[in-house]
Amino acid sequence: ITIMDEFKGPYDEIIPAFPIDTNCEQIVLSLDDIDSFRRIEQIILKGMIMSTNSFNDCPFCGEAMTKLDNKLEEEYVCYHCRQIITKKHCNEKNKDYYLTNIDGFKPTEFVKHDAIYHYRNITKCNQVGQFICPCCQKIH
């Protein structure tokens, strides 16, 4: 965090990464772990979603996305790879955030948080698949 403070720029999130599993909230990145590539892919996917205002093209596969007719929230789906991007609002912090999901994918039991949605989720989930708001850390 001290290094980031030197830049004095705005940032929403710091992602600490370590070459070994420290059993805490850090991301493990190592050369001998295939999941490391998937975690990097997940970080890039999140950056692509957070840095755009329109979802004409799917950030996962590059095909066209379709805006769904949902009056409550802004939601887009890619019919090619089934990626769903949903814009949500946290009333507690009065901030918008995005959820990603796979259309029709409903896992029942989770073993590893990173792999819940095949590394295509950008928002944390609990053990039963409920998304945790990144703004207030609660389930809406």
Image: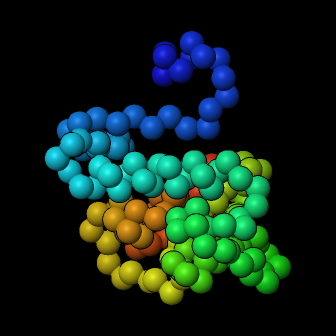
Q: Residue at x 79, y 83 (%)?
A: 69
| Residue furthest top in the image | 6
On screen, residue 76 versus residue 5, left or right, reads: right
Relative to 27, 138 lies left or right = right
Q: Of residues 41 and 132, which is closer to you in this image?
A: 41
| Residue in the picture at 23% in, 41% down | 30
**Quadrant for the C terminus in the image:** bottom right
Picture mark count: 0
Relative depth, front residue between 31 and 134: 31
Say if 16 sits above or below 127 in the image: above
Q: Quadrant of residue 7?
A: top right
Q: Is residue 139 visible?
A: no
Q: Quadrant of residue 125?
A: bottom left
Residue, x 61% and y 77% (percent of image)?
78
Residue lying at the far right in this picture: please name it: 71
| Location of residue 96 in the rendering, given as x and y in whole percent from the top left corner | 73, 54
Most distant residue in the front direction: 63
The x and y percentages for residue 111 are 27, 68
Q: Is residue 129 visible?
A: yes
Image side of residue 45 versus residue 22, left or right: right
The residue at the far left in this view is: 32
Residue 26 lies, in percent from the top left, at: 35, 41
